Image (tube, helix red, strand yellow):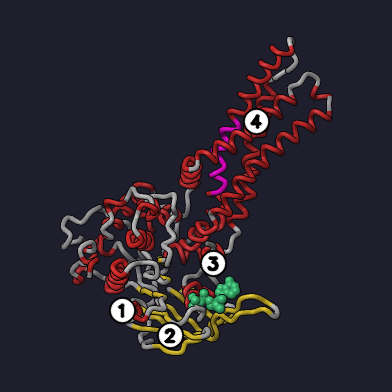
Amino acid sequence: MAVAESMAPLQPDDSHFDPNPVGPAPSPASSRLPEGGEPTHPSEPKPAEARGILTQAVGIRAQHLSRVYGSGDVTTVALSEVSLEIAPGEFVCITGPSGCGKSTLLHLLGGLDRPSSGTIHAAGLPLSQLGPAALEDYRLQRVGTVFQFFNLIGSLTAQENVELPMTLAGVPPVQRGERGRWLLSLMGLDHRAAFLPGQLSGGEQQRVAMARALANQPGLILADEPTGNLDSMGGEQIISLLRELHRRGMTVIMVTHDPEVARYADRVIRLRDGRVVADSGGDRQTARAPVPAPPVTRLQPRDALLMGLEESGRRPTRTLRTATGAVLGIALAALILSIRGASMGRGLAFLAFVALIIAGFGIVNTMLTTVVDRTREIGVLKALGARTQDVALLFVAESTLIGVSTAVLGPVLAVILSRVGGLIAGGRFFDMSPWVIVASVFLALALSLFSGVLPALRASALDPIRALRTE
Ligand code: ADP
């Protein structure tokens, strides 16, 4: 197939390769990364690199799964009494007409949603009984997801997109940089590392998404109509990649309604009206007990802060507009408080309070608009395994630049205005004491933190599936 050229490093002599190495449990993600960067010769990849693609393949057992949406009289039965077993290393295609429950099943298997009844075990974990944190760890460590519409983060480069799941897993920058470059090179995209998704073709974007799906060495790839938005060559490349991963031992579950695409899988499960109506396989059993995933480090505050600052920097006009409003609000509040005798006047204190509220409203408004604009992005972050608090942290971090600039520039502007006002009024009309300056610095920091928290809570509370369906 056409991808063979770019996939050369992914075609090793399989005699070296054991996808489920028996022995001690794998070390944490950060130390499992390949030591080297590029293979010395495309046809001779080092075994360590081959093993670096995945950890133990995931096996799945679903019993009597049902998923009912809605409540009361208005309910939709998306899945009904679905029972199936997928052995580690199988390449399974879920097919059926639109609305038959394919995506719902995929979301349940990926730990993005919970069944209304029935049980799912994946990698030995009882998904249907896990708490939110354990389910987020499962998504981050075990599952790599590929979407029909790629769902790359538009403001991040190809390299940064591939690194994102590793950032969420707390992998140190040098290691995630190395692994990101290596995965992009496996996809034949080294020369596109610094490109934004909008500068890439559909096929290239989907290959970046494949590299991202492999970032944390998953044991299960879930692909939802991965060829649905590609031309035939791009589609062939993605199927070829999925087959290659399967050949290396990974469990691959792909949803498609295209029979041409479905024939590449070893086993086809057909759904209709939320039920399994045909299954061409399913007699393979889980061969060995799953190895527990190592403890995961998770998003570091320093990385969250950097990402937040970069995001503010990528939208300079918005950041500048909001910061200007907040700076003016703080300066005005400080100015009012420094009017001679202001400490006595409740009216003036009230005016200062109003100025602060207006400054805070500006930040809240901008950040809430950001949450709405980036709903889908938040869904993607959660699908990749971001925890609720990670999403909140990223949004709080984004308001940091506005907060710090307000804390510095607000008091400076207040001092300048008080001097100018004093000159114009011809006397000491303002009494800008050091206490008012210190208080306005703290007020600015508290205000921006508070104004950042509200949108952050809103973002982190979004339902990932709804967020993913947002256009
Ligand atoms: P497919 O992927 O096969 O097209 P889905 O799994 O997306 O099907 O949907 C199965 C059924 O569940 C459809 O009838 C769909 O309208 C319904 N459905 C999916 N998600 C929701 C939701 N969040 N709320 C209500 N109904 C939903």
Whether residue 170 sits left or right of residue 115 in the image: it is left
Q: Measure the C-alpha gap from mark 2 to mark 3.
A: 23 Å
Around disc 2, counting alpha carbons within 10 Å, would you say few (fewer than 14), some (14 to 19), or many (20 or more)?
many
- Residue 188 lies in quadrant: bottom left
Q: Residue at x 60, y 33 (%)?
A: 324
Instruction: Decide whether residue 368 is among the magenta residues.
Output: no
Which element carries disc 2, helix, strand or loop?
strand
The kind of residue tagged 2 is Arg
Q: Are marks 1 and 2 in contact (CB under 8 Å)?
A: no
Q: Residue at x 48, y 63 (%)?
A: 383
Q: Earlier in the sequence, mark 3 or mark 4?
A: 4
The kind of residue tagged 3 is Ile
Q: Pick whichever, 171 or 457, lies toward us.
A: 457
Residue at numbered disc 4 = 328
Query: Could one spot residue 23 in this view of the protein?
Result: no
Q: Pick whichever, 53 or 70, lies toward us.
A: 70
Disc 2 within 8 angstroms of ligand 1 (CB):
no
Residue 167: x and y in percent read: 43, 52
Quadrant assignment for ligand 1: bottom right
Around disc 1, counting alpha carbons within 10 Å, would you say few (fewer than 14), some (14 to 19), or many (20 or more)?
some
Residue 368: x and y in percent read: 61, 50
Residue at numbered disc 1 = 264
- Placement of 188 over or under 319, stated as above or below: below
Question: Which labelled disc corresponds to residue 465?
Answer: 3
The kind of residue tagged 4 is Leu
